[in-house]
Image (cartoon, rainbow, N blue to C red):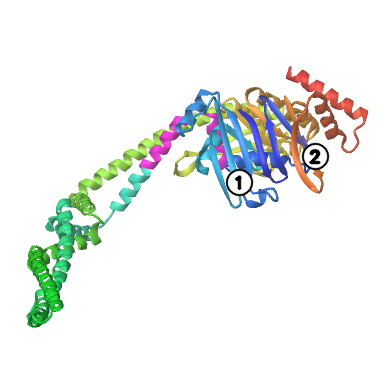
Amino acid sequence: MLENLHVKNLALIDEAEVEFTEGLNILTGETGAGKSIVLGSVSLALGGRYTADMLRRGADYGLAELTFSVRDEKQKEKLAALDIFPEDGQIIISRKLMDGRSTSRINGETVPLARLRQVSELLIDIHGQHEHQSLLYKKNHLAILDAYADEGAQLKKDVQSAYRTFRENEKELSRADIDEAERLKEISFLEFEIQEIQGAGLSPEEAREVEESYRRMTNGKKLAEKVQEAYASTAGEPGGNASDALSRAIRALQDISGYDGRAEELCSQLLEVDGLLNDFNRELADYAQELSFSPEAFYETETRLDEINRLKAKYGSTVEEILSYAREKEERLQVLRDYDAWLEELKKKAGDSRKELERLCGKLSAIRKAAAGKLEQQISEGLKDLNFLDVQFRIQFQNTRDFTPEGTDEVEFLISMNPGEPLRPLSEVASGGELSRIMLAIKSVLADKDETETLIFDEIDVGISGRTAQKVSEKMRLIGKKHQVICITHLAQIAAMADTHFAIEKRTEEGRTSTSIYRLDEEASVRELARILGGAEITDTVLENAREMKMLAGRLKE
């Protein structure tokens, strides 16, 4: 059940909060007061389309938040399948709307819009004018019948599964239909690919070792080149290295060291440098020896790595994928070598899956036809309750041209609303007001089977008045006994039936317009009914009529 609606900074609403109750919740207000904004906020919270112009002017963000209480165990199981669990028996859905983007949360946890919509479908059913129009399309009629036929629910899933299997087998059989020349050509190509992969003798371990060796050798080669360059500069060919230059400098200083103490001191320092350089050259030579490797070994490693990379480019990004590719091709090769037997097996599979699908479709069709008879009767009774006095309603079956995921039934609702008129499709005879009543009759029949606790009706009273409006109000009251119903209406007959009555009002203060919503007590509800009945001037007579209407509605509810 929807317990609370909290709206902030949306359209004409600064901030509003509504505490809904069980039974029939009615919302009324002047044309343009913002009734559509209230239900639009519910739709937004549940993942409806959002545009930046929905934000109240000057606001940085908008908020639509719904609080549901969940008591039904089946509902809890379905929510758990979506990894959603009520906290203290409640689920809080909120959607924060910012310029060009939005954030949705369920019980404080951010969720994608797809998940939000899945959860919403379990908690609430919003019925607006476009749902009335959906009755014009016969593709929706089968869905209504299936919603009524409880025992067909699992069978319908079985049909969908069998349909997928059948289509897969048909596609496989179609792909298998090749001539002898194509078969031999494919065999030759597969043999080439398999031989190329198997001839390479690949293994994941060896590939890793080759890559590691190549990296080591590549780096070792660069190191060896640079070490050799350094050695050539310090102890390489005579006359062109640091050691020879240093020796010449030492001999020059030794020739003059006997003449001056400073020259002797510098000579001594240079001798120390010469000793250090000799030690360095010995260590550099040892290091160069360690880095030496066989050019033949490097060539072999590089060649092997090139072969592995070439096969990766053709058959898979890793050795594991290449080997998996080879196994698949070996299986395909085996099939082609034993083609006739394989083709016969495919034909048998396709034939068996067709028979199974035909069997399941037949069972499903039988269940639908049995349910259709009961549904026809209940909808006909519901239509008579809604002031269709001489109505005839039928559900017509035809077979589809081929199998579909829904089976082989094509269903269409036919109606005759006047004596002597033939049964015809809804799209040919029903007006907008009639469609709304037909949908209400269907909803009332399905309400007993519907696990969705909260139903919202917007524009259910379009195009009706007088006695018909009274009949619609009584039907809404009946639905409200088993479901929480939230209804926007402009008819006093429906508003009088409210268990809880809310008024929506638009006000302008200091040049700023805003919409507010508040709950009415008994007397305020009577005055609101009088406003609906009397229009601009509410006289004592109109008030008395409104009070009488409220009293009569109370007796009906009792």
Q: Is residue 119 magenta?
A: no
Q: Which residue is mark 2?
A: 30
Disc 1 to disc 2, C-alpha distance: 27 Å
Quarter residue 4 falls in: top right
* 376 vs 257, nearest the viewer: 257
Q: Is residue 249 above or below residue 74?
A: below
| Left/right of residue 310 with respect to residue 544 in the rendered view | left
Quarter residue 440 falls in: top right
**Stretch of the chain drawn in magenta:** 137-165
Quarter residue 415 falls in: top right
* 312 vs 460, nearest the viewer: 312
Callout count: 2
Q: Is residue 157 magenta?
A: yes
Q: Residue furthest right?
A: 540
Which kind of residue does numbered mark 1 sit on?
A: Leu
* 175 vs 307, nearest the viewer: 307
Q: From the image, give the main secondary structure of the stretch colored magenta.
A: helix
Q: Which residue is mark 1?
A: 97
